[in-house]
Amino acid sequence: MGTKVRACGLVALLSGLGWLGPVQALDWSSTLALESAYSYESGDWQKNSVTWRPQIVGRLGYGTKVTAEGLVRVDVEDNLDPGQPSQPFRARDSRAYFPNDLTDLELRELYLDHYLGSAFIRIGRQQIVWGQADGLRVLDVINPLTYREFIMPDLEERRVPLWSAQAEIPVSGWTVQLVWVPDGSVTESMLPGATYALFEDPFDGQGEFRVNRPESGRQGDGGLRASAFAGGWDLTLNYLFHTVDDPLVQVDPVAMVTTFNYNRSHLFGATAARAFGSLTLRGEIGSESQRRYAQAGYQGWQSTRETSYVVGLDYSVSGDLLLSAQLFQRWRHQADADLERHREQLTFLARQELMNDALIMELLTIYDVQDQEALSQLSANYRVSSRWELSAGGDVFSGDRSGTFGRFHDSSRIYIGAMLSW
């Protein structure tokens, strides 16, 4: 019933745009991707999927544009998000639809772009991206993430689009962006049974999981960003009042209940980037007024103010080779003996373009300093023609099996794929 209501709502929304005038142009594009991933440590197929992504862009009167993008995916292995999940981490109107165990349908994006004088407005289901860091999030926290394939896909694929609104207004050499997000969806952790489940079931299927996420509309997020180019620097100043999407997990052994709780926080931050010839320096910093962490046994918690930053250096060795390194540090200001005061991660990226950019090879490594563990990703993408692209690669986890990366040692994989665009 809920799916029918959402479908009718989308039709009503598109029909209601008629007051902006008739459709002046309609552009259609689509991609069809075939992907297979094999976990060589366990000897199991992780996925064998077909994904269709249609997109329609309609241009209306008065410079208005409407964009809609959908996703239809069939995965015959059904290991990454088994069955027909209830999606407790998503608000009702942001959920996918699972007609059976192997198929999921999702409205990825549906938004309207419009100019009011010099102000730009976008309203609808969308991604709003902040920050300068590659892969590591400091300020890029407006949209929650899905951990369906942990952190292997690009951030654009892992962000959960939200129903939201943004406006960009030029003010005295600056561009001020106002953001409002009434959607109550939070980071989508895979529950026990999935390949990349982040939490183990302490009650072996006999207990209950509860997700106390914020209520859509009444507990929305809001913020602003001011950006400018000054003295050769790209600068931004950021503020966001939001729900911290990463959960505080608590376990009640008597009631046999595992609860995911969330807290509200003020996030203040800034970014800066500048190119010095073939060298680019990037920096990003953010300070949360409150983050909550579970204590041992998940039966208590502590609260702390937290500051995170990323410093990145990109070096273009030639027009075809890029080397990049980043240092990420998280500093907890009120940590007690059960919580580490600080944590660091290092990233290294090498990207080589060959054959007139038809072939792109990339190596990305993320290393956790405290746990001495890593995720290494090697990929190759070959554009056969303007429509066909082939890909292959591997994702390798290393480190102690109790760590963030090492726990997925047996899920290290190799993969191949093909994508058709039209």
Image: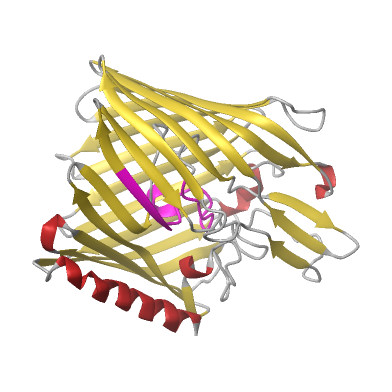
* Quarter of the figure that contains the C terminus: bottom left
> x, y (%) of residue 388?
20, 59
Indicate yes or no whether the magenta region holds residue 150. yes
Left or right of residue 358: residue 256: right
The structure residue drawn at horizontal position 30% and vertical position 65%, both measured from the top left corner, is: 69
Q: Which residues are magenta?
A: 142-167
Q: Is residue 200 visible?
A: no
| Side of 287 relative to 390 (left or right) | right
Residue at 51% in and 65% down:
45
Q: Residue at x 57, y 36 (%)?
A: 266
Quarter-of-image position of residue 373: top right
Position of residue 77 in the picture relative to residue 336 (left or right): left
Looking at the image, can residue 242 be seen? Answer: yes
- What percent of the width, then of the height, locates residue 62? 12, 58
Where is 178 relative to 77, above or below?
above
In the displayed structure, would residue 3 be above or below residue 316?
A: below
Helix, strand or loop: magenta stretch: loop
Q: How many marks?
A: 0
Nearest the viewer among 174 and 53 is 174
Residue with the most extreme left position: 24
Residue lying at the far right in this picture: please name it.
Answer: 254
Q: Which of these two is toward me, 83 or 418?
A: 83
Q: How is the image coloured?
A: secondary structure
Left or right, 342 with respect to 386, comes to right
Magenta residue check for 334:
no
